[in-house]
Amino acid sequence: MKKQLVLVGNGMAGMKVIEELLNQAPERYQITVFGAEPHGNYNRILLSPVLAGEKKAEDILINPIDWYAERGIRLHCGKRVSVIDRDAREVRTDDGIVQPYDQLILATGSLPFIPSVPGRDLPGVVSYRDLQDVEHMLAASRQYKNAVVIGGGLLGLEAAYGLLKQGMTVTVVHLLPTLMERQLDAAAATLLQQTLAARGIAFKMAAQTTALLGTDRVTAVQFADGSTLPADLVVMAAGIRPHIALAKDSGLGCERGVLVSDAMQTTDPHIYAVGECVQHRGQCYGLVAPLYEQARVCAAQLAGDADAAYTGSVISTKLKVTGVELFSAGEFQGGDGCDSIVYQDAGAGIYKKVVLRDDKLIGAVLYGDTTDGSWYFQLMKAQSAVNHLRDSLLFGPVSDSDGDSKPAVLDWPDERAVCDCNGVCKGSIVTAIRDKGLQTLDAVRAHTKASASCGSCTPLVEQLLAAAAGEGYQAPTSKPMCGCTEHSHDDVRAAIRTQHLLSLPQIFQTLQWQTADGCDKCRPALNFYLLATWPGEVQDDASARFVNERNHANIQKDGTYSVVPRMWGGVTNASELRAIADVVDKFQIPTVKITGGQRVDLLGVKKTDLPAVWSDLAKAGFVSGHAYGKALRTVKTCVGSEWCRFGTQDSTGMGIRLEKLTWGAWTPHKFKMAVSGCPRNCAEATIKDFGVIAIESGWELHVGGNGGIKLRGTDVLCRVETMAEVEEHCLAFMQLYRDEGRYLERTAPYLERVGLAYVQQRVVHDAESRRLLAQRFRDSQRHFQKDPWAELAHAAARDQFIPIADLS
Amino acid sequence: MPAFATNTQPGVAHAAGLVEPGWLAIGVLHDIPRQGARVVRTRHGDVAVFRNSSDEVFALLDRCPHRGGPLSEGIVHGRLVSCPLHAWQVQLDSGEAKAPDIGCVPRFPVKLIGTQVYLGLQPLAESRARLNTVD
Ligand code: SRM
Ligand SMILES: Cc1cc2nc3c(=O)[nH]c(=O)nc-3n(C[C@H](O)[C@H](O)[C@H](O)COP(=O)(O)OP(=O)(O)OC[C@H]3O[C@@H](n4cnc5c(N)ncnc54)[C@H](O)[C@@H]3O)c2cc1C
Ligand code: SF4
Ligand code: FES
């Protein structure tokens, strides 16, 4: 019979032991896992991206429930072990499960430390440790405004950033005068605080919390100096304590943590312990990389390798706040007998410090540019002498061989570890990229797990990918918007929203743009973000518009323009066509063409004629077709039930209704729609940003398609019955895309980025969310739905269409 | 002779019209949209007169060195204009395309006296030689 192996704690360290063991000795044990949380094992590190809305809970699962069953592992999910009976060699839960063991692994993790202040049990006070905490915070963020985070360490800052992104007003309270004192020196901490403050997080430093006030729910936080801060949500992130109660009660040797030997054995040879609950050679660890090292040793021991030993770890930290680059490792403070080398570029927001002792690198702090972090970390772990590198150390690794500046990782031996969390070496990454033809960072993460945990080796993996995949590789998009700034699109949008920024100069100043007035890349994007965030409040800035959107016509290669009047749903009539014919004659327009969008294009109009052309078209009842704009373009329709023998609904009428509702709306990229009267789909609704296909019982709604350069068919959003429902879903989807799409990102890549399930949640399943989105769209239309041609056709605006002087 | 003009000069008591031979009044500063341009028709072709966010004024032939795009319709940022056709960036104060692109467009002398903008119709000497290369 197989031996019984029992794991208590279905978390990151414990399950790493099981995964490793299944690799090394799959048949050796019958495995049983107890986990107090009601989920499969998930990547706790990634709770912060979930809180910030950058990932969904299901994205961070490591082992779904099925995974256990498929491997013959018995999982007691949501069951807490309350007793270890070491004499009987069995564990028990309160609800009566009794499980015997031959070998037991304890991996119970940590408990959040909650300072003992009055009011700590009030509703609205949460810790930050597991998925349930994140759910509490997300629920609070939808209902309440003010959040106070107690603790300015890694957890506290990540929580603050997430809550800010969820739209809360956030203050971080910290006991000491500088942030993250366990990872950062004062200089780097100050830079970090400035960056986060610019994003909109408030700080109260050197402040001691004395009480949480409130009766039914927390309402305020009180400090030793007598001051208070309003708070509807208080997040306790003041540190963690190894969770040792179970071990201690059963008489195992414990100090701060459960004591273990180099073999990861506790004082009872049948019981191993790994993870945050452990104290090894006097050290407790709170980061994944060392815990995974422990797990590998423990697995090897359990597989029968009695020589496997854990000797302690050097650790490095990275803060997971999007757009903030920060790295810290080892003895970064410096001090007696140490030598520090510092590089600082305040303008660019870059700070680097490396600490040397006896010619060896023993610590590093990097802020702003962390590309070299993994290299320093390798030098520290290898304890290599670095005296010959001293002068160039701060400028990063240069390949020794030929002196060119190709990244040093390319010269690494294949067996050297790139990802310390998951123990992935360079060779396996390169092989996976080559053999599987991987092109993106996410694909490499999916196939190798490299950089999928804490992410600090991401730059190295990107370098390998870039070198191996060559041209096809595109770096992921939390990159700066353009050369004028370090902020990404998402950061800038968040700042516009949270700091209520209303003009380009205000953005340039607040976010410390590196150019006086931006460039042709960022100005149009910023102008769109401003208009989309604060419709009616922000003045459109013509100087930030691309020529077509400024002149409301498409510029042609010879400097003339094309003009496309709107034809609602592609339907026209004799008097409209006559008016168009008259304009063509009067202004001698050389080409008239039917467009792919079911309307008429007048090509070759001289700039000086534009106002008069528009004015004649307007008299005939036309408005601009926005054929030039990052805006609603056409709504194509088929003839539908009015004429067609197969038609099931009035697709033409539906299309016209949608176009009348949405014309004039600005969107991140162009937005096209189509409505077909039956599944034969003559209007090609399945390659549109929003497509509608009539069915017997109503309408099937589609999203995220486009023709164009990279063809993508739509995904089905849902089915609805009435025209009013089609309208509401359409408006809600457009608004969601407008809120979250990055400038020049069409709905297809947007949808792939956020996922269909998310869009369905916001637009289909959550009726209130849909209603609010649609309502905001309708509200903004009051400001956007003005015919630009009418506004430009009057006399005062005509000046800009004629020369200022004629000297010829 | 200034190749570009700023608005900091004190108003001079010259009336509109010819200031000295070769200078032509083309309009007032406010006729040119800030971070935009207006066109002057001349015997050399259209000349684009730009005004940037610091109210500096520049004049270039309105033909991109790439494929002749109308620079007057480009987005103006700093002392650069981005051509509306294929986004080459041209330096307003020299007429040179910004690296990596190579090319140059003739520039013309402009000056600002008070709020009056004056244009000199002789392309600046160092760029006149290149006038032919544009065609
Ligand atoms: C006029 C028209 C061609 C025609 O004669 O039929 C046209 C003309 C242009 N298209 Fe288009 N597209 C036209 C229908 C389409 C269609 C068909 C459709 O809408 O059903 C497509 C593929 C469907 C789609 O967009 O998903 C199409 C995909 C593109 C693309 C590639 C988009 C993509 O996401 O890959 C571009 C490039 C871009 O937008 O960056 C583009 C860009 C352009 C521009 C605006 C290029 C430019 O910036 O100058 C052309 C303007 C010419 C002009 O001055 O009028 N046009 N273009 C059509 C105008 C429809 C209208 O009534 O407004
Ligand atoms: C928000 C957040 C961000 C983080 N970011 C990073 C980071 O960027 N980089 C990094 O390296 N680390 C990070 N960490 C730390 C990292 O997540 C932990 O170090 C790691 O998860 C610890 O693993 P563990 O297995 O020891 O404990 P856990 O993952 O906490 O697992 C312990 C499990 O045991 C269960 N359990 C406890 N007692 C019992 C019992 N009696 N019976 C049954 N089940 C029990 C618990 O419910 C829990 O599920 C972060 C942590 C948090 C909370
Ligand atoms: S989609 Fe169907 S109803 Fe519409 S025209 Fe085609 S066949 Fe007729
Ligand atoms: S014509 Fe100016 S960039 Fe091509």
Image (tube, coloured by chain):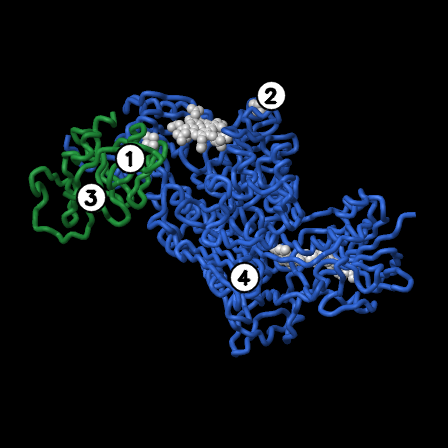
Comparing B98 with A710, the one in front is B98
Amino acid tagged 3: Phe
Find residue A103 and report its image quarter.
bottom right
Q: Is residue A87 left or right of residue A436?
A: right
Residue highlighted by disc 4 = A357
Q: Is residue B62 visible?
A: yes
Please identify, in this view, whether the residue under mark 4 or under mark 1 is nearer the observer.
Answer: 4
Residue occupied by mark 1: B71
Both marks 2 and 3 on one chain: no
Q: Which residue carries the number 3 mark?
A: B4
- Residue at 65 percent of width and 64 percent of height: A127
x and y percentages locating residue A248 in the rendered image? 79, 68
> Amino acid type of disc 2?
Arg
Q: Report the residue at 46% width, 25% height from top.
A: A596
Q: Which chain is green?
A: B
Residue density around tag 4, few if under 14, some if 14–19, many if 20 or more, within 10 Å: some
Quadrant position of residue A329: bottom right
Residue A355, given in percent of the width and then of the height, sits at 52, 60
> Which is in the foreground here, disc 2 or disc 3?
3
- Mark 2 vs ligand 3: CB below 8 Å: yes
Q: Amino acid at mark 4?
A: Arg
Q: Determine the secondary structure under disc 1.
A: helix
**Left-right relation of A2 to A374:** right
Q: Is mark 1 within 8 Å of ligand 4?
A: yes
Residue A117 falls left or right of residue B10: right
Which is nearer the eye, A213 or A678? A213
Q: CA distance from mark 3 to mark 1?
A: 17 Å
Chain corresponding to blue in the figure: A
Q: Chain of mark 4?
A: A
Chain designation of label 2: A
